Amino acid sequence: MMGQYKTPGVYIVEKSAFPNSVVEVATAVPAFIGYTERANNKGKSLLNKAWRISSMSEFISFFGGPPKTQYQISEIAAAAAAKAGKGGAAPAAAAAAVESDFASGDKEYVLELQGARYFLYHSMMLFFQNGGGACYVVSVGGYTDNIEKPKLNAGIDVLLKEQEPTMVVIPDAMSLAEPDCIALQQAALSHCGQVMKNRFAILDVFDGYKEAQDSGCIEKFRNDLGTNSLDFAAAYYPWLNTSIVQTGDLNFANISNADKLQELLKAEVDGSELDDKKKTEINGKIAEIGVTPKTATMSTDVDLHKILTAVCPLYKSIIESIKLKLNLLPPSAGMAGVYTMVDNSRGVWKAPANVSLNAVISPAVEITNAQQEDLNVTTAGKSINAIRTFIGEGTLVWGGPHARWQQFGLELYQRAQNHDHAGRIHQTGDQSVCIRTQCFQHLGNDQKHDQ
């Protein structure tokens, strides 16, 4: 604003030749794609729409609560026979390969997942527990739908119209068949590196809760993923044993065959040293499992769960086993939270390495120094970031995101943490400059560039 001149004279008024400057853009705004209980905003459908939220309470408000995941109680012998019947190993070998979840009497049992495993809800909790903030959610279906690659792929396409997201995370990809999972991850890489060119995919390793040497999960991941747009992604191994799901979040409704549960609990009570009156009382409560509608004399499901937990050690053991299974989560959402926290507190130039993870008890697989060397430096150049546990420090992200999966020589290994992270810095700079120079694009030669 020009001031008032009170005396005659010559005055120089300087006008900045470069009034516009490159504006700051958010560097860590993930977009999550997956299945939710609902997708609704005051009666308006949010299905297949990118919706911005900033807290878990907002997620619940728009997308609902957790899935009611169910497990079937099966004897190991029966489970092994079913596996052998599907073309697997011989029953004896299959039984030896199955790990028992709990035992009752002289028999061992497993809990077999019934239906699909929907990861998104609990992954969102892991994201916010680790510093997550503003993000986008694309719901592609509900808990009654099958998890399908075309639907998740369509969720990636929804993000084409959104400018703000800088990361793509798809936890539900881990519930697909392995070939479909890899194809979806390749689609995410193409979206980030070839179409948008300013986004970063955080990938999980399929079957990443298994030992790499036994399952070959790392080798298959590297072989199948290909080489396109790998500088726009980072992968993490192994999966995480978390504390997201609590015992109070579960009850007998998480068991699909209630009759088998009742049979095992009654056998436990009948074989105990309790007096007959107490046995009759507890067996009466066991008989209430799954009964609807309940009479006035029956306990509510919440009270019945508490009673059974207190008086039936086997019931408590089964619920704890289910809790362990549901708390096994792929790490991508947690890492998205770490990216957000580090970028907000330090900046995008700081690699999210040597950072502890919240709500994580341990990695699903313990990694040795020798195994980590193979993850970080390989002849193929596809480095995978390790998550490890250290005495006195907890579970740490050990190594920066390998945004550039190139062939690092051994002499570059010590610089890998910062060198690899340059990819995300470059992408962020590109996006910031691109947004600020939009006012100069597509103007005619006779138009003034006066903005």
Image: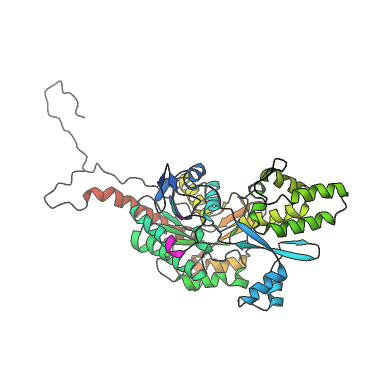
Q: How many labels does the image show?
A: 0
Residue 210 lies, in percent from the top left, at 61, 66
Coloring scheme of the render? Answer: rainbow
Q: For residue 150, which quarter of the picture?
A: bottom left
Left or right, 436 with reference to 422: left
Q: Which of 15 and 366 is in front in this view?
A: 366
Q: Give the range drawn in magenta.
A: 140-151
Q: For residue 388, which quarter of the picture?
A: bottom right
Left or right, 267 with reference to 38: right
Task: Note whether residue 435 is visible.
Answer: yes
Task: Note whether residue 402 is visible.
Answer: no
Position above or below: 230 against 278 = below
Position above or below: 349 against 223 = above
| Residue sticking out furthest to the top | 6
Q: Which of 418 and 150 is in front in this view?
A: 150
In the rendered view of the protein, which quadrant contains the N terminus?
top left
In the rendered view of the protein, which quadrant contains the C terminus?
top left
Position above or below: 406 against 160 = below
Residue 61 lies, in percent from the top left, at 49, 43
Q: Nearer the viewer, residue 269 or 333?
A: 269
Left or right, 216 with reference to 139: right
Which residue is drawn at the image coordinates 51% and 57% (left, top)?
Answer: 144
Residue 73 lies, in percent from the top left, at 69, 62
Which residue is drawn at the image coordinates 18% and 47% (left, top)?
Answer: 449
Q: Does the magenta stretch include residue 249?
A: no
Which residue is drawn at the image coordinates 40% and 69% (left, top)?
Answer: 228
Which residue is drawn at the image coordinates 62% and 68% (left, top)?
Answer: 211
Residue 427 lies, in percent from the top left, at 37, 56
